[in-house]
Image (cartoon, rainbow, N blue to C red):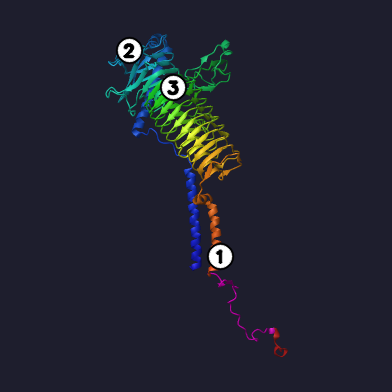
Amino acid sequence: MSGSRRRKSRTSLVVLVLCLVAGGTWTYLSYTDRPAPPPGVNQVSQADAQQQSTLVDQEDLRIMQTRATLSSALARGGPAAAQARVPHISSSANGRTLVLPQRREPYRIADLERLGQEQFQKQSDDSYVLGINLFLGPGAKLVLQNATGPLVIRMRSEPGAFVSIVGFGASIRINGSAQNPVRITSWDAQARTADTKVSDGRAYLRAVGGELKMSHALVEHLGFWSGPTGGVALTGSDRPTRTAEPVAPAEQASAASDRQRMLLPNGLLVPSRGGDDEIEITDGTGARKVAYRLPEANLVTGVITDTRITGNAYGIFITASDETRIANVSVTGSLVHGVLLHRFARNASVENTTVTGSRGDGFVLSRGTQNVTITGSRAERNTGNGFTISGLPLARGPSASGESLRSFGGSSLISSTARDNGRYGVEIQGGVKPVVQTTEVVGGEMGIVVSKDATDVQISGNRLRGQRSQGIALRDGVLSARVSGNIVRDTQTAIYLRDSKATISANTVQSASLHAVSVLGAADGTAITGNTLGGAGRSALDTARAKGKLALAQNNTAGWQNTAGFWTMVKRIAKPMNLIWFGVILLIVIAALRALRGDGPRVGRRFVSPYEKQMVLEERPAWVLRTAGSETPARRS
């Protein structure tokens, strides 16, 4: 290979390497722009997980068997019903249970002493040790309070055995006072302390339907594995729990209900046709129609106030509820999440509640929740997010249970605080009309993050500082968001928008170190107006990577210092296509320089004709060039 060809090959190789390096750098920047995955929480070994899961299944089976036995006895009537209507002990393969059926008066501490006998006795320190499961049937009432002094109930929870208090369609009331709170804790009699090991199960408190009201209580080290067995749980169902009942013709016109499905005597759950509260079906011969009233769903409700909860698996777990209220509650050291409102929790309020040191998130509003308001609350030093609000639909497409594809929404976070949480301060995933307003977010990887097609989001009047990456981030299909009146400081990028549409107005940015506002990807229709942008970084308004029409107006960037140096400028222009064109131009320049240097056809600095040194053609004899036509007539003859 000639020297000229080697030099051309070497130049092409350099250009190719530059392009690959540029492409790799671009890919890396795009990847690091994505949020970190959620941290693992409550990680356990496979053996412990299997054991706890099995215990949850056994608990569900025990509760269903106890309820079924009670309902069957009451339905049969006679001696069986008479026996079922009085407190009794039910035994099964999954443990012994003290069953408290409905009666006129509520059950109190004195009743538990009498009925539980050695399984509920007062100790020398005036505390009580509960050594048997309690089950309250539909309509039963349990009141735990002590007017003469503090009430302490230690629930047996030791290797191989634990107890629970479960109300099914019942009323559980725990009434303490500021001077005499009610303390409920797990208890390992062998260790003489609360049970802090969850792998073998742990005592818990649960209301299934009905209500749970708790005031001035101390709850410590309850629950394991699942939400219903997580510690303090309010669980219901959005579906009826009893069969439909025949409706007299005179009652059909006035019957009312708010449900749309009903359970027929054959066990089928079908939509209503005859109205909001009834359905008409034909009998076996098709001769007549029968109307059935739709029973109410077994939703739970409750109020928890002035209570301190420590070391539960889930601090408070609520699902399928209506109008629950949590106020003036402190939740500390939960093994999973602090306060979790799960599917079909609606119209709930959380006020002046603090969650600290959970291994998961502080507050969680999961898919299926709607119209939940959190005000004046605080999430601090939790491993995951401070607040998580999800309005995602229960299904994205066809599902075995036929879940709705609609999004949920209407939830809001107002005048609250998220401080020094491991992941984000506030995360909103999907949903319609979520609101984060007048809330303070300190620290964390990011401050307020909105994603997954959330619509009509309002983020206003918040104060954010000290985030490691971004203050307010909207990404992945957010639509019609309004980000206004927020103050963001001491972070890299104050407001970040990616593949989303928003109106960003009247915000104040202080001490940003990368960008004040950064817009990437599809952002057609986004407006950035009237913001005051201060800091020192690459740019105040980073919109070069945005696609679509943006409206930029009246943004004050006088307080921004552009610190983009030489290498920053290089990175801005070092795009793959730019480098390819640069390489092409470089090859042309190199070729020209080689010509000037003497590698081409030149003499000194004077360009000459490329044919100048070619030899002149040799002259041939004249006779050789003669043609046949030039011969004389004599010779031709």
Q: Secondary structure at mark 2?
A: helix
Q: Identify the image quadrant of residue 64.
A: top left
Q: Is residue 634 left or right of residue 553?
A: right
Q: Which residue is mark 1?
A: 592
| Tag of residue 328 | 3
Instruction: Determine crowd level at label 1: few under 14, some 14-19, many 20+ residues with C-alpha closer than 10 A.
Output: few
The type of residue carrying mark 3 is: Asn
**Residue at the location (46% across, 29% down)?**
417
Q: Magenta stretch: give its range.
A: 599-628
Q: Secondary structure at mark 1?
A: helix
Q: Provide the major secondary structure of the magenta segment.
A: loop
User: Percent position (x, y) of residue 104?
Assistant: 42, 9
User: Percent position (x, y) of residue 205?
Assistant: 39, 21
In the image, residue 375 lies in the stretch drawn in magenta: no
Q: Earlier in the sequence, mark 3 or mark 2?
A: 2
The type of residue carrying mark 1 is: Ala
- Given residues 467 and 5, the one toward you in this image is 467
Using the numbered discs, state the Cα–Cα distance from disc 2 to disc 1 in whole angstroms. 104 Å
User: Percent position (x, y) of residue 168?
Assistant: 42, 18
In the image, residue 612 lies in the stretch drawn in magenta: yes
| Tag of residue 113 | 2
Using the numbered discs, state the Cα–Cα distance from disc 3 to disc 2 in whole angstroms. 31 Å
Instruction: Kindly indicate whether the residue at mark 3 contacts the one at mark 1 (C-beta within 8 angstroms).
Output: no
